[in-house]
Amino acid sequence: MNTPCQAPKAGSYRLGSPAVIGMENLWVKFWYKARGEAPSRSRRKQLPRAEPGLASQHRSRFIQDISNFRLLIQGWWIMMRKSMGIGGLLAIFVFGVVAEVDFISRKLDFGLSVAPLTQGLLVIVLTAIVVAFRIRKPPKMDLPPGPMALPIVGNWLQVGNSLKHRKLAEMSKTYGDVFMLKMGKKNLVIVSSPEAAKDVLHTQGVEFASRTRNAVFDIFAGKGQDMVFSNYGDHWRRMRRIMAVPFFTNKVVQHAHFAWEDEVDLVVKDLEARPESSTTGIVIRQRLQLMMYNIIYRMMFNSRFENEQDPLYLNLKALNGERCRLPAQNSKYNYADFIPILQPFLKGFLKICQEVRDKRLALFKERFVDERRKLVNEAGVTNIGDKCAIDYMLEAQKRGEITEGNVLYLIENINVAAIESTLMAIEWGIAELVNHPEVQKRIRNELDEVLGEGNLVSESDTHNNKLPFLTAVVKETLRLHMPIPLLVPHMNVKQAKLAGYDIPAESKILVNAWWIGNNPDLWDQPEKFMPERFLAAEFTEAKSIDFRFLPFGAGRRSCPGSVMAMPLMAIVLGRIVQKFDLLPSPGLTKVDVTEQGGQFSLHIATHSTVITRPRA
Ligand code: HEM
């Protein structure tokens, strides 16, 4: 029960400026509300209005004023405590004291009067504080640890623009397996242990299965019209289902591997035909790049490029290169990602991204999709040889499941995800083989032993641990030189829990798969290329996913292309080693394996010149 007390009257003590009188009336309202007697509109109108100017000179009235003031403060206290908490109340208290000092000093002529302008300003500032506090504060979160963040820029100055695997690994030693960086507007959560990775990718796979968006990837992925950068949901499921049939099943691999082996043999023939490849050496990446384009374009469009000088191939390669290079300009990309308000200053950069996107999509459409569509319409899909991935996409489009835009963005995804990452991995593998002749020898021995001398390794040999050492070489290459070291960033649509911490909604989650695969606490001499580590029973006999080894991620958003990337790597490395001795350039004992990149992809800094000397 409220104790009966006298309702204050607005204007019963007046503090001078109209702004303060306004506040005074507000206090009256709160007083009534605090007592559960909120006056109706009409009742409020009946309340005596405050008159501007100083009020009563009367001493008894002054005492009444003081007592009313106490009641008002009491009313405010109850009201405000409900809506604002202690901070807001303190602000009001300061205001009350200042106003009262003003009031008393005017009455008693102390000359301490606060000028009306100051009062007005005080009212504005304090009202702003009240409003800020009244907007319900979200419940306090127990955020992951991390360096102290500055306003606006957050941790940007400490971290800089290179959010790379090694730097993040270093930071995890200070801040732990799950730590947080505030980068401008965005929260970044960095995950650096197998346990936390399992939680993100598997246990809470659905919660963390979406992707973050930003201005640059909105351009390249058509605001989620694609598959790789779309949020987890119906659209993503549909896209993945449509792409699974022509790309991501064992059946596809069993069918497509003839073309892969064909392309590898053409590489071998080309290398044999070039005299310099066995003397001064060649940059082998360039020929392997053509091989990867041909493997993927055969699967996608049933088409291939004749040689490295093919103008269409050169055009395509240049545009794909630009697509990968532009986001990798870390500073501009990061501004667009972390401080969207700065986008007007990035107009030039974003315009270039748009131009590259438009040119690429136009090229995909005019030179591949439309040509294939025409061929199918004229001859019928059954009469034009193998059904390829684009046929499945166009059928889905005809059924109304996806749009033409979706088809083009799917092609864009495969160009980036399939070709470049596999090429990087093969190039790393070749470099390590050059630097480890004993590993080349051991692969040959295994192949001779298992397949018989002269028989080239083929796709069917890469399963069921038939060639454990070759498989171990592939895995060790991917562990030491993970092509996508932080995976593709994940995102939680809603607030979530991870390792006991609160993860704010829409955080960008980076799983540092490279560090998990290279942490000396988890691996013996991780900096060394030692394929034999993967011969241990814990790897060969493991039935479940080992979260220490995540070159393809795991769970819902894991790489669906691993089903072809692993056997393909084994075939390429195996056949090249069967045919050639791999050596560094004349005068060198090793090829340089310095790495470059790390925020998106990790590639060899200097494309190695390698001597491929045919074996007798
Ligand atoms: C050595 C070669 C490859 C590596 C290292 C690799 C690695 C990865 C990684 C780390 C991811 C992200 C996983 C995550 O976010 O949790 C990914 C996603 C993806 N990869 Fe691969 N990949 C390779 C080859 C391929 C190939 C050959 C294809 C296609 C034929 C492919 C298609 C994709 C697609 C479509 C996604 C997006 C999956 C999704 O968001 O649902 N990748 N890959």
Image (cartoon, rainbow, N blue to C red):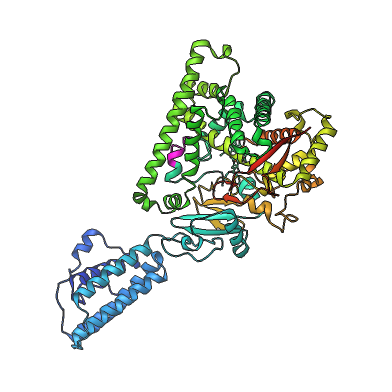
* 103 part of magenta stretch: no
Res 27 quadrant in image = bottom left
Which quadrant is the C terminus positioned in?
A: top right
**Residue 408 rendering spot, x and y as whole percentages:** 47, 29
* 221 part of magenta stretch: yes
Res 42 quadrant in image = bottom left
Left or right: residue 263 versus residue 60 is: right
**Residue 151 rendering spot, x and y as whole percentages:** 42, 64
**Residue 371 rendering spot, x and y as whole percentages:** 48, 19
Q: Answer above or below: position of 497 versus 113.
A: above
Left or right: residue 552 versus residue 47 is: right
The one of 188 and 601 positioned closer to us in this rendering: 601
The one of 179 and 3 positioned closer to us in this rendering: 179
Q: Quadrant of ligand 1?
A: top right
Left or right: residue 73 versus residue 15 is: right
Which quadrant is the N terminus positioned in?
A: bottom left
